[in-house]
Image (cartoon, rainbow, N blue to C red):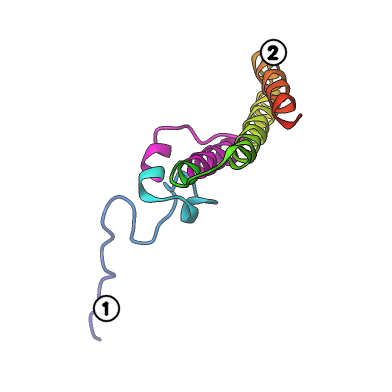
Amino acid sequence: MEPRDAPEKRKSGGQPGNTNALKHGLYSRRFHTAELAALQSMPAVGLQDEIDLIRVVMRRVFEQACGETLDLEGWSKTLGALGRAASNIATLLRAQGQVAGKNSEVAAALSQALADVLREFES
C-alpha cells in the first residue's frame, strides 16, 4: 500500500483571498487607496459605511470644484449639493443613534442646523 500524501499544512493568519478583515467591504472598490487608509481608523458599525461613503464623495466633489473655475452659480450648486449631503449624514447619524438605542439629541440638533443652512442656500 502506498503512503498517502499528507495535506499541505496551512499557514497561520489570513489566507490568500480571505476578506474577513476587510473593513469597508461594500464600497471598498470605490475608494482610492488614501481614502481606504483614512477609513481604517473609523469603526465600521451600523450605517457607518454609508456615512463614510457620503463623506468621501463630498470631499471628491469639493476637490473637483476647487480644481475648476466656477462662477457664483457653479459654487452655489456645489454648496447646495454639499449641504444636502451633510444633511443626509446628519439623518444617518440620527438613525444610527436610534438603532443603537442611544440618545440622539445631538444628532437631531445637528440635523436641524444642517437643514436650516440648506434651506438658506436653496432660497
Magenta stretch bounds: 36-62
Task: Find out whether residue 45 is within the magenta segment.
Answer: yes
Tell me the number on the disc at residue 105. Answer: 2
Q: Can you give x and y, in whole percent of width and height, for residue 72 in the image?
A: 59, 37
Q: Amino acid at mark 1?
A: Arg
Secondary structure, mark 2, is helix
Q: Is residue 49 magenta?
A: yes
| Viewer-proximal residue among 110 and 60 | 60
Q: Percent position (x, y) of residue 37? A: 36, 42
Name the image quarter holding residue 88.
Answer: top right
Residue at 25% from the left image edge and 71% from the top image edge: 6
Is disc 1 surrounded by few (<14), some (14 to 19) or many (20+) residues within 10 Å? few
Foreground residue, 102 or 104? Answer: 104
Residue that protrudes farthest toward the bottom in the picture: 1
Residue at 40%, 33% (x, y): give it: 41
Pinpoint residue 90: horizontal percent, then vertical percent: 65, 27
Closer-to-camera residue (105/65): 65
Task: Quadrant for residue 38, please give it.
Answer: top left
* Residue at the disc numbered 1: 4
